[in-house]
């Protein structure tokens, strides 16, 4: 397993064993956690991320996977392109709101949510 896959598995495991204590709060930042995962494992990851949020934690995910986008509570779309053509705030909102935007992310999400 790659290091990233092991780290993603650890997040899934932690979501299943950690319960938010009164006053406890953890910020999780994941960078492309679905890379190299089987679709069934992506589904487990999404479920684990929801569990962490339900327990009172904050989860920030940098991701290109449409399944993850569609399940997000809030999206931040940076672009409009990659590299030197990106890095600007293009849109923010719920997945269904981003899907209405005339951006590459909006168009991809609109087709996915149909």
Image: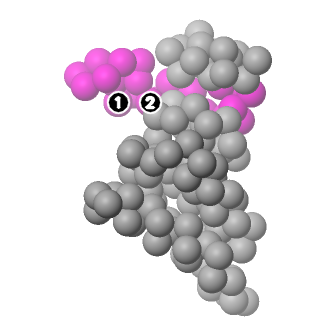
Tags 2 and 1 touching, CB below 8 Å: yes
Q: Is residue 91 magenta?
A: yes
- What range of the chain is rendered magenta? 78-98
Residue shown at the point (46%, 34%) measured from the top left: 64
Quarter occupied by the C terminus: top right
Residue 69 appears in the figure? yes
Q: Residue 44 got which mark?
A: none
Secondary structure type for disc 1? loop
Q: Which residue is mark 2?
A: 78
Residue ranking furthest to the left = 84
Tell me residue 66's x, y (percent).
58, 32
- Residue 57, position as x, y percentages in the image: 63, 70
Q: CA distance from mark 2 to mark 1?
A: 5 Å
Q: Is residue 58 above or below residue 17?
A: above
Q: Residue at x 47, y 66 (%)?
A: 9
The x, y position of residue 79, in whole percent, is 41, 24
Please tell me whether residue 95 is drawn above or below residue 10 in the rendered image: above
| Count of all numbered marks drawn on residues in the image | 2
Compare residues 41 and 77 and report the one nearer the observer: 41
- Looking at the image, residue 41 lies above or below residue 97: below
Residue holding disc 1: 87
Q: Secondary structure at mark 2?
A: strand
Residue at image point 39% right, 66% down: 7
Judge left or right: residue 16 versus residue 54.
Answer: left
């Amino acid at each position: 397993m790659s290091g990233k896959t092991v780290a993603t598995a650890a997040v899934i495991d932690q979501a299943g064993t950690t319960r938010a204590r009164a006053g406890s709060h953890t910020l999780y930042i994941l960078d492309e956690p679905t890379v190299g995962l089987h679709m069934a494992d992506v589904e487990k990851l999404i479920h684990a991320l929801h569990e962490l949020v339900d327990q009172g934690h904050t989860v920030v995910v940098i991701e290109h996977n449409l399944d993850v986008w569609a399940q997000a509570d809030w999206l931040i779309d940076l672009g409009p392109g990659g590299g030197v053509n990106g890095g600007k705030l293009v849109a923010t909102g719920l997945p269904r709101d981003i899907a209405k935007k005339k951006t590459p992310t909006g168009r991809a999400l609109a087709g996915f949510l149909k």
